[in-house]
Image (cartoon, rainbow, N blue to C red):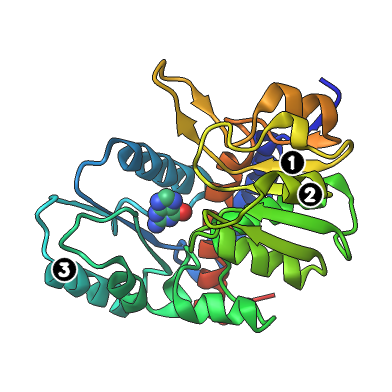
Amino acid sequence: MKARTLDGKTVAARIRKTMTEEVAALTARHGRAPGLAVILVGEDAASEVYVRNKKKACVDCGIESEAFSQTLPANTTQQHLLGLIAELNANPKVDGILVQMPLPAQINPETVIEAIEPDKDVDGFHPYNVGRLAARIPSLRSCTPYGCMKLLEETGIDLHGQEVVVVGASNIVGRPMALELLLAGATVTVVHKFTRDLQSHVERADIVVAAAGKPGLVKGAWIKPGAVVIDVGINRLPDGSLTGDVEFAPAAERAGWITPVPGGVGPMTITMLLANTVQAFREHLGDAP
Ligand code: GUN
């Protein structure tokens, strides 16, 4: 392997250490800890793991989560969930509200996201927060793209004018990722399921961000020598192992930098959720830097 590893675990641990100290100081100064409500509806196995990890990360850095979090049954009505969100919106001890996606079919995710007060939308999914990013005045930023930007910072590469190809156009990753990169001065192409020639786009990219959720979609042989490869995909194979959207071994022979899966983008997403919660807390207290 020729590429240098963009090690999300190490970067995340460094950011979390600093944040834990910051949370302790803020908690002492204001007499309460930051509060994050994590809401899970139903019994999706992957979501249960994500939610458990998010709550544990809160405990580890001094954010109060257990007191406000709830797991609701799969047959929960949209009206009930909206009632709970209204209560959390009104609770001054709650700085952030996260409703884990996907939701059961009877609940409309857009309605739920729009019900969360934008200043408590620590996922950065509310159209207000996406719009702030599009208008170059970001507030709470979507966690995964925000984490990818932190990883790109680690390379020391100036993003101005870099050719970046984002593979995938989802609301959670691809779209806000493109907006982050545009804000940073990159030349951004978003490719998606209707794109005619994925290979030709990837081949000319200085930076590839793969977020399609399709194992091995991006072939290692397509990677431009020296390019940066950020693999957001977390796909479970039939043998139980995790793999990204990029063919790792051949890509690592060509790339200058590459994220592993697991241990690349994954740890950064939760870290930026914590960072958003601390930012919301500071803003609620009038103690933003
Ligand atoms: N489901 C998959 N990723 C996410 C995320 O970042 N936030 C929420 N709320 N749900 C998700």
The x, y position of residue 99, in whole percent, is 33, 60
Residue 49, quarter of picture:
top left
Q: Position of residue 98 (x, y in %)?
A: 38, 61
Camera-side mark, 3 or 2: 2
Q: Residue at x 11, y 64 (%)?
A: 77
Residue 229 x/y as whole percent: 74, 41
Residue position for label 2: 207
- Distance between the Cα atoms at labels 3 and 2? 40 Å
Say if mark 3 contacts mark 2, CB within 8 Å.
Answer: no
x 34%, y 54%: residue: 100
Q: Give the image quarter of residue 168.
A: bottom right
**Residue 26 versus residue 221 in the image, above or below:** below
Q: Residue at x 54, y 75 (%)?
A: 130
Kind of residue at disc 3: Gln
Asked if 260 appears above or below 124 in the picture, the reply is above
Residue contact at pointers 1 and 2, CB within 8 angstroms: yes
First reached walking from the N terminus: tag 3 or tag 2: 3
For residue 70, above or below residue 110: above
> In the rendered structure, are the residues bearing label 1 and label 3 in contact, judged by CB atoms less than 8 Å apart?
no
N-terminal label among 1 and 2: 2
Q: What's the residue type where badge 2 is placed?
A: Ile
CA–CA distance between discs 1 and 3? 39 Å
Residue appearing at x 61%, y 42% in the figure: 265
Q: Element under label 3?
A: helix
Q: Identify residue for label 3.
A: 78
- In the picture, the disc for residue 83 is none
Q: Secondary structure at mark 1?
A: strand
Q: Is residue 3 visible?
A: no
> Which one is nearer the viewer's eye here, 221 or 116?
221
Q: Residues within 10 Å of mark 3 (few under 14, many from 20)?
A: some
Residue indicated by mark 1: 229
Q: Tell me which amino acid carries mark 1.
A: Val
